[in-house]
Amino acid sequence: MRNTSIPPAITSDQASAQAPDTPSSPAAGTPPTSSKAISAVEQALRMARTLHRASKDATLLVAMPAVRRAHGAGVFAELTLSALYRQRHLLQRKHFLRTLAVEAGFANWEAYQPVLRSLPPQAQAHYTTGLEFGYPNAWFSTHAQAMAFAAEHGGKVVRYGHQAMVVRPEPNAVDAEVQHGA
């Protein structure tokens, strides 16, 4: 199979001599393979982009959660939720950055960004889509309710906007052996 990242006229020795520190770009839709973790700011920017794209989707099921989050954060507060949905072409990336900031307890993106820069990448685990977690998970209206449930029953708390869910812990090998009678 031919390597498409290097032109056929350049050998691998020539390619490494020309660009020793240039990583090859990953295929579309695949995560980068570098060992460097994505910063908290980059994670927030990606989440804002995801929400912005979702808000533009023609499907109500896809667009409405993003529009609802922006409306809940006070973006275009003068409009009702249904009016904002009908006029979602007004929503820009900056509105979703503000939404993420408000959801994190800050007044705006400008106040939130310096805090994000000081956070380690794993601190932004709540910027997940929720799709990587299986069903069923326990959903709660507030993060405090989810924390109380997780303290009693176990599991990992994941923020999702103003709400939170508790992901059931994966059974370890000992539990799996006990369940299967080994």
Image (cartoon, rainbow, N blue to C red):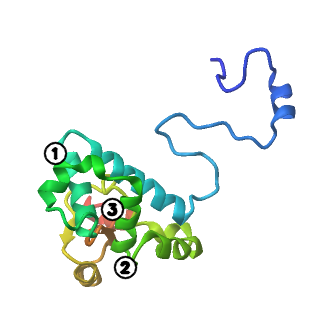
Q: Residues within 10 Å of mark 2 (few under 14, many from 20)?
A: few
Name the kind of residue labelled 3 in the image: Glu
Q: Which mark is residue 88?
A: none
Name the kind of residue labelled 2 in the image: Gly
Disc 1 or 3, which lies upstream in sequence?
1
Label 1 with label 3: CB-CB less than 8 Å: no
Q: In the image, is residue 104 above or below residue 175?
A: below
Q: Secondary structure at mark 2?
A: loop
Q: Residues within 10 Å of mark 3 (few under 14, many from 20)?
A: few
The residue that disc 3 covers is 177
The residue that disc 1 covers is 60
| Residue 71 found in image quarter | bottom left
Q: Secondary structure at mark 3?
A: helix
Name the kind of residue labelled 1 in the image: Leu
Q: Which residue is at the front of the view, 164 or 168?
A: 164
Q: Which mark is residue 105?
A: 2
Q: CA distance from mark 2 to mark 3?
A: 44 Å
Q: In the image, is residue 142 above or below residue 57?
A: below
Which mark lies nearer to you, 2 or 3? 2
Q: Residue at x 28, y 78 (%)?
A: 143
